């Protein structure tokens, strides 16, 4: 093990859905939401301490071996459309200025996402890595951790000395991935001549097909570490499933392999590539219409709640989190003991706080984002509970992370035939943790139906309490049927879905 090195650490995270309506401005990165706010210098260490974030895992592993860590900056923003040129250049310029001010660096670690698209170019991470290389040169190792949904590019592989990628979706191994990045760095610092190779998968598959709790992803990911352990000359294997709602040339899944023996790296890549191709028919994308999903949930309802995933309005994939298709279906079909979360409407959340608990509101809820086909839900609502949006996540994915979601309200739809409540928020945030319901006094295990604006991440906390989970195709800016997307920049020949037509 190497010891006593100086390593610069930092991160810049965004997952870009180019089909979404709203862009990520500098303000989005500057403020806290479900993750810490933009953090600079020494404050980075306290902000990340104890969190399930890659940079936390890297820091803990590096400190174990008595390395000196030079903090740069770390920031993230909720997934949306393009990162504005202003935001990107301000953040990367500051990042590079801090990097240039560091003396006698032995290595650099970057906590990136891998699916950032900027207004003025497609590959946010590849360009950032290129600029980092201009500063540190070719001899200093630059280690990167990426999200499972990364759209890995040739530039990322060219400029990074090694890449590690999440292996779980829901992402339970984020800090672990940072620790694996340190392990790769340690091998390089110890003298290993790391050889890397990447291969793109020739088909896209939606996020609904990427969950590692189910086949075929479960078997693919479970095999990775065993192959490394059994193969001399092999150091690391990772598989990025890609983030398909990104209209860029290099969108899609990819395999990345590192080792000290080029022949072993290439042969391993060949075998895993074929494993993924063979699994193509197994990727499923079962989606129900809102009305059908609600009726099934009513029929299934028993001692445990049925969970409805409003997958296409997932703010964690660029959705506006304010479409009302599933809410309307819950009311129209007469759902009982049903709660939907989180519907983004800061205007109505503010009105509820001004009116107070017990008040009645005549309101047009949601549908204010400008997303085409998303209309407000007009009804009478009773304000049942209010919250300030400050609470601690309790689920495994975001355990110990502090939510900063602003004013929130629990509203009951006043209707003679339906028993439906809505958790309204002032910040777009994915509903992936039971603490969101409990913050407003709702015990999720006591409900018949839980409707969550999430695609897969909710499963880590909600599936254990669920009678069954149904995935719903209600209106939203995160399309799950990829053949319906109007790709213009995607490279030719890629199949738009497993076993689907070519672009």
Image (tube, rainbow, N blue to C red):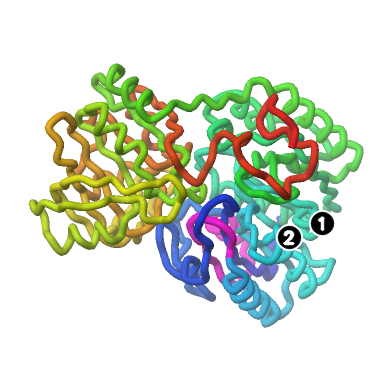
Looking at the figure, which quarter contains the N terminus? bottom right
The magenta stretch spans residue 77: yes
Q: Residue at x 67, y 61 (%)?
A: 124
Q: How many marks?
A: 2
Q: Residue at x 45, y 44 (%)?
A: 314
For this orientation, the residue located farthest to the top is 299
Judge whether 375 appears above or below 295 on screen: below
Element under label 2?
Answer: helix
Judge whether 312 appears above or below 141 on screen: above
Image-quadrant location for residue 240? top right
Give percent across and percent down for residue 36.
44, 63
Q: Which residue is mark 1?
A: 158
Q: Which residue is mark 2?
A: 126
For this orientation, the residue located farthest to the right is 263
Q: Residue at x 85, y 45 (%)?
A: 260
The magenta stretch spans residue 452: no
For this orientation, the residue located farthest to the left is 358
Image-quadrant location for residue 463? top left
Give percent across and percent down for residue 287.
48, 27
The magenta stretch is: 55-83
Tell me whether circle 2 and circle 1 mark residues in contact (CB < 8 Å): yes
User: In this image, 363 relative to 43: left or right?
Assistant: left
User: In this image, 503 relative to 149: left or right?
Assistant: right
Q: Is residue 93 visible?
A: yes
Give percent across and percent down for residue 170.
50, 39
Element under label 1?
Answer: helix
Q: Residue at x 14, y 50 (%)?
A: 383
Q: Disc 2 to disc 1, how far (Cα)?
A: 9 Å
């Amino acid at each position: 093990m190497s010891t006593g090195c100086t390593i610069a650490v930092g991160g810049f995270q965004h997952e870009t859905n180019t089909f979404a309506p709203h862009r990520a401005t500098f303000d989005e990165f500057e403020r806290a939401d479900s993750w810490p706010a933009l953090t600079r210098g020494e404050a980075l260490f306290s902000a990340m301490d104890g969190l399930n974030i890659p940079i936390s895992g890297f820091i803990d592993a590096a400190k174990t071996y008595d390395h000196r860590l030079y903090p740069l900056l770390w920031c993230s923003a909720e997934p949306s459309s393009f990162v504005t040129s202003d935001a990107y250049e301000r953040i990367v310029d500051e990042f590079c200025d801090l990097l240039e001010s560091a003396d006698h660096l032995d290595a650099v670690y970057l906590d990136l996402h891998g699916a950032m698209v900027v207004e003025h170019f497609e590959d946010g991470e590849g360009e950032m890595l290129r600029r980092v290389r201009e500063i540190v040169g070719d001899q200093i190792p630059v280690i990167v951790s990426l999200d499972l949904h990364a759209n890995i590019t040739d530039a990322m592989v060219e400029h990074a000395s090694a890449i590690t990628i999440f292996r779980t979706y829901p992402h339970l191994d984020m800090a672990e991935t940072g620790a694996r990045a340190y392990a790769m760095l340690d091998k390089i610092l110890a003298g290993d001549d790391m050889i890397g190779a990447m291969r793109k998968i020739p088909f896209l598959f939606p996020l609904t097909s990427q969950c590692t709790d189910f086949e075929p992803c479960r078997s693919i990911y479970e095999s990775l570490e065993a192959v490394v352990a059994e193969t001399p000359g092999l150091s690391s294997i990772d598989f990025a499933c890609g983030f398909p709602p990104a209209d860029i040339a290099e969108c899609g899944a990819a395999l990345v392999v590192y080792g000290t023996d080029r022949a072993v790296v290439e042969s391993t890549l060949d075998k895993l590539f074929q494993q993924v191709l063979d699994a193509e028919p197994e990727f499923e994308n079962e989606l129900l219409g809102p009305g059908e999903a609600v009726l099934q949930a009513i029929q299934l309802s028993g001692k445990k709640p049925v969970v409805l995933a409003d997958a296409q309005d997932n703010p964690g994939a660029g959705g506006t989190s304010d479409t009302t298709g599933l809410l309307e279906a819950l009311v129209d079909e007469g759902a009982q003991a049903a709660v939907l979360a989180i519907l983004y409407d800061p205007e109505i959340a503010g009105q509820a706080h001004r009116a107070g608990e017990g008040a009645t509101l005549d309101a047009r809820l949601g549908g204010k984002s400008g997303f085409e086909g998303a209309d407000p839900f007009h009804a009478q609502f009773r304000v049942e509970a209010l919250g300030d949006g400050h609470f601690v996540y309790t689920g495994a994915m975001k355990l110990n992370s502090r939510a900063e979601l602003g004013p929130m309200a629990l509203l009951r739809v006043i209707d003679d035939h339906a028993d439906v409540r809505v958790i309204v928020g002032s910040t777009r945030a994915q509903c992936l943790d039971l603490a969101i319901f409990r913050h407003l006094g709702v015990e999720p295990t006591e409900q018949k139906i839980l409707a969550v604006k999430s695609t897969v991440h909710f499963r880590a906390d909600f599936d254990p309490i669920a009678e069954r989970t149904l995935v719903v195709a209600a209106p939203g800016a995160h399309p799950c049927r990829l053949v319906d997307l109007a790709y213009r920049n995607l490279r030719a020949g890629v199949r738009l879905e497993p076993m689907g037509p070519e672009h």
